[in-house]
Image (cartoon, rainbow, N blue to C red):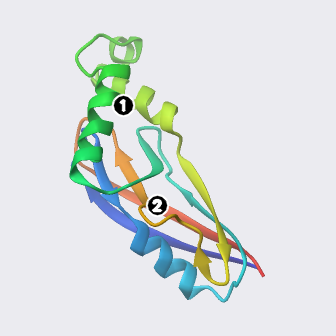
Amino acid sequence: MVFIGAISLDTKGYSDIIDITSGVVSIAKQSTITRGLVTVFCPGSTGALTTIEYEDGVLQDLKDALERIAPSGIPYQHDERWGDGNGFSHIRAALLKPSLSIPLVDRRLTLGTWQQIVFIDFDNRERHREIIVQVMGD
């Protein structure tokens, strides 16, 4: 069986980190699936999904680490071609990836105690995003 839902978000860009755990849990509960796999997917090439402890310090640490890995203030070939200034956004999203899968056991996501599901918008502007949540199993 497959059940599909979506989470609508309005983001600020520039590594805006949004906790979507409750939305994913809600969609999983709406399904009648007891055990299986929950896949969360972000259409687009400047956003990513991951898990993290949703705490101010570690959120800032992640933003700082990504700025060191793919700095926003350096030239990118993408910017030369398209002139939109978001080359760094594409690199960061490619490193973290657009999807995440979580096992579903007894109608519960198997997340750790301090593990939340987050969407990160790396673009250099505000965006409206639709995050797809697919629950598969029996």
> Percent x, y for residue 32?
66, 89
User: Residue placed at 30% from the left, 50% from the top?
Assistant: 17
Q: CA distance from mark 2 to mark 1?
A: 18 Å
> Percent x, y for residue 1?
77, 79
User: Residue placed at 45% from the left, 36% from the top?
Assistant: 93
Q: Tag count in the figure?
A: 2
Residue 123 visible? The answer is no
User: Residue placed at 36% from the left, 47% from the top?
Assistant: 120
Residue hosting label 2: 131
Is residue 136 toward the left or the right of residue 60 in the image?
A: right
Vertical position of residue 69 compared to residue 99: above or below: above
Mark 2 is surrounded, within 10 Å at the Cα level, by few (under 14), some (14 to 19) or many (20 or more) other residues, namely many
Q: For residue 77, what is the image quadrant?
A: top left
User: Residue placed at 63% from the left, 83% from the top?
Assistant: 107
Asked which secondary structure carries label 2, the reply is strand
Vertical position of residue 57 compared to residue 23: above or below: above
Residue hosting label 1: 89
Q: Amino acid at mark 2?
A: Ile
Q: 12 or 138: which is nearer to us? A: 138
Quick one: label 2 or label 1, which is nearer the N terminus?
1
Q: Quadrant of the C terminus?
A: bottom right
Q: 54 or 17: which is nearer to us? A: 54
